[in-house]
Image (cartoon, coloured by chain):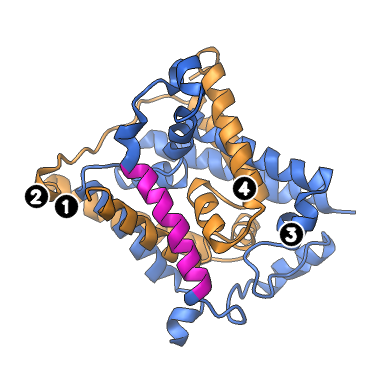
Chain colours: A orange, B blue
Amino acid sequence: MKLLKFFIVGIVFGIVLTKAEAVSWYRIYEMFMFQSFHMYGIIGTAVFVGVTGIYLIKKKDIQGFKGAEIDIQDKDFSYSRYIIGGTMFGLGWGLVGSCPGPIFILIGNGVLSICIVLLGALLGTYIYGILKNKLPH
Amino acid sequence: MEVIQGTWHWAVSGFLIGLIMLVLTYFGKTFGMSSNLRNICSMTFAKRKIDYFDFDWKEQRWNLSVALGAVVGGFLASYFLMDSTDILQINPKTLENLKLLNIDAPNGKLGPDALFSLENAFTIKGFFVLLFGGFLIGFGTPYAGGCTSGHAISGLSNLQIPSLIAVIGFFLGGLISAHFLIPLIFGS
């Protein structure tokens, strides 16, 4: 039953992203064309809430749920992997209008052809796994 | 009910997404959906063949549960909480752009038929556009060490410079797609 709470968080995530229309190709296209504030508002607000929350967790030394250890890790510094990998992801995001979360959510939304995107994504991760040590990080 | 059935305001949506990230942090985890692509790969034959997938995916069952929940949440929202006449009121200018590219307007759909209709998805071009887009997402996110949730939300919330660099990359790629790739693929 430890997994149930994560399943419920996932359900809320799926509902919010669908109702926010962040799963919609149109909203992503509109964002990258700079023709709407909607997506910027969503990401901006989420980061604002996140920064405040993480700051408070660190400052007040808040303990995790039922003794769970709160694990806020710093990311390793580099340029190449973030710029090259990030740009590749952005190209895909702008093209098919979905990032990994929405790929799962859109299956539930009944957009069946998203399964081809998921297949492509799994293939991409698989090839990355093979090439990982040969790529600049 | 109208408030629920229509598009949720960006401030409400953003607030809830921030909260979801914080709840997962409180549970001792890190919000990041792209890890699930790696998790799914490691559930297959890839685990024994490739080092990158050789880890105990069972420790990631929590994250797979989030993904499974997301599928169910998407279903619930689409079938019970949505009035399709009242969604996706996008910028009229965007609609004009789309018309020039022969991409259909939303009219209650989450994605255009020009990309996502099954009829299109099973043409050679349609299939490869979706597969190629997915490939870039699947290759790019583990390379960058995260996606929108892992870098743009979790990483930026923890004031991580690497996440900022990654987000700049996301936008660079997205802008190239929206302004050059999409007109190239769909424009006549």
Asked whether the beta carbons under mark 4 and mark 1 sit within 8 Å of each other, the answer is no
Q: Which residue is drawn at 48% across and 31% down?
A: B142
Do discs 4 and 3 belong to a common subunit?
A: no
Q: Residue at x 59, y 24 (%)?
A: A127
Q: Is residue A100 left or right of residue B54?
A: right
Residue A56: which disc?
Answer: 1
Binning the other alpha carbons within 10 Å of mark 4 as few (below 14), some (14 to 19) or many (20 upward) gives some
Which of the two residues, A77 or B24, is positioned nearer the viewer here?
B24
Magenta residues, as a range? B62-79
Residue A46, picture quadrant: bottom left
Which of the two residues, A68 or A63, is positioned nearer the viewer here?
A68
Q: Earlier in the sequence, mark 4 or mark 1?
A: 1
Residue A115: which disc?
Answer: 4
**C-alpha span from label 1 to label 3:** 46 Å
Question: In front of the other: label 4 or label 1?
Answer: 4
Residue receiving disc 2: A60
